[in-house]
Image (cartoon, grey):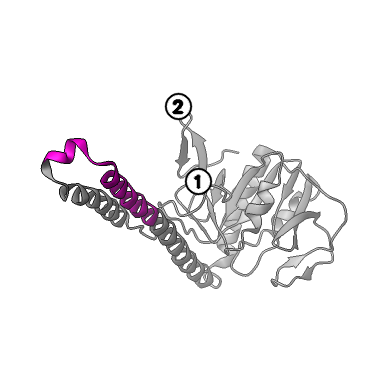
Amino acid sequence: MSVSVCASCDSLFLFSVLGAAGLCSSFLPQPERNNMPVRQSAVILLIIHILMIKFVYYRVQRLKMDKKIFRQKCLERLKSAIGSNRIRKDRIVISRLDRLLRRIAPKSMLVYLPMDIEVDIRPLLQRWRKKCKIFVPFIEGASFRMVEYRLPLRRNRFDIYEPPGSGRKHKDIDLMIVPVVGVDGDLRRVGFGKGMYDRFYATLKKRPVVVFVQRKKCMTKERLCDSYDIAADYYITPEETLYRGKTDDNRDIIGRRWRLRR
């Protein structure tokens, strides 16, 4: 699943900037080109500056549109996967997730309580409640805070289940299990567009291991997200598991078809 980003449009626009600069200089008298008057030089630089600003604005706006289109296509795929072998797909994801957790052995983790389009990880939670502290999001305003996973659960204004709130604040966790709508080429999360996970992640002092899970893989090779969007260390789907690694020169690399050994 991918949404193509028109790189050729960027090149065309950039060439138009350079072409405009050349066009401006061509109007100057031939003998004066090597000794351009200050006023004419300033005009040309101003034109180039304006065109470059327009280029940056155009680029940002187009990426926002591409991200919006990509999100919509991913949501359509996830909605279509609700009734097609949903239980089997969820079991595959849970099995891979369980093996990863046994390998990492976190003492605390933030999970989620699923909506219909998300992997139902509740069987995994029952299995791990005795092994580590489990927290879930409790939505407050434009973000959320962590509360301990406990019953009874109730639906919030977003129709998502959550436990009763607590005044106690929990700051650090070892691992996060995060549902996604889609994933871009940097292994960054495309969610519902509210930015709650991004805001929460920015408040953490200790960086946890981040695991994205999804019932049906929806990923693009293009870079659609911003630098502040949360990125995954692992991305688990029924199709495959991807992980983020490092090359010898410390560059990020995305590994494919990685399998955990028992």
Report the residue marked by disc 1.
242
C-alpha span from label 1 to label 2: 20 Å
Near-viewer residue (15 or 3):
15
Q: Is residue 218 visible?
A: yes
Q: Determine the residue located farthest toward the top in the rendered image.
A: 248
The vertical placement of 242 against 153, above or below, is above
Q: Position of residue 125 (x, y in %)?
A: 73, 55
Q: Amino acid at mark 1?
A: Leu
Determine which quarter of the picture holds residue 88: bottom right
| 214 displayed left or right of 208 | left
In percent of width and height, residue 40 lies at 26, 47
Residue type of the residue flagged with mark 2: Asp
For label 2, the crowd category at 10 Å Cα-Cα, with few meaning under 14, some 14 to 19 and many 20 or more, is few
Say whether residue 34 is magenta: yes
Dominant secondary structure (helix, strand or loop) of the stretch shown in magenta = helix
The residue that appears at 86% across and 58% down in the rendered structure is 166
Give the SS element for disc 2. Answer: loop
Viewer-nearest residue: 213 or 84: 213
- Residue 1 appears in the picture as rendered: no
For disc 2, the marked residue is 249
Point out the tag, 1 or 2, that comes first from the N-terminus: 1
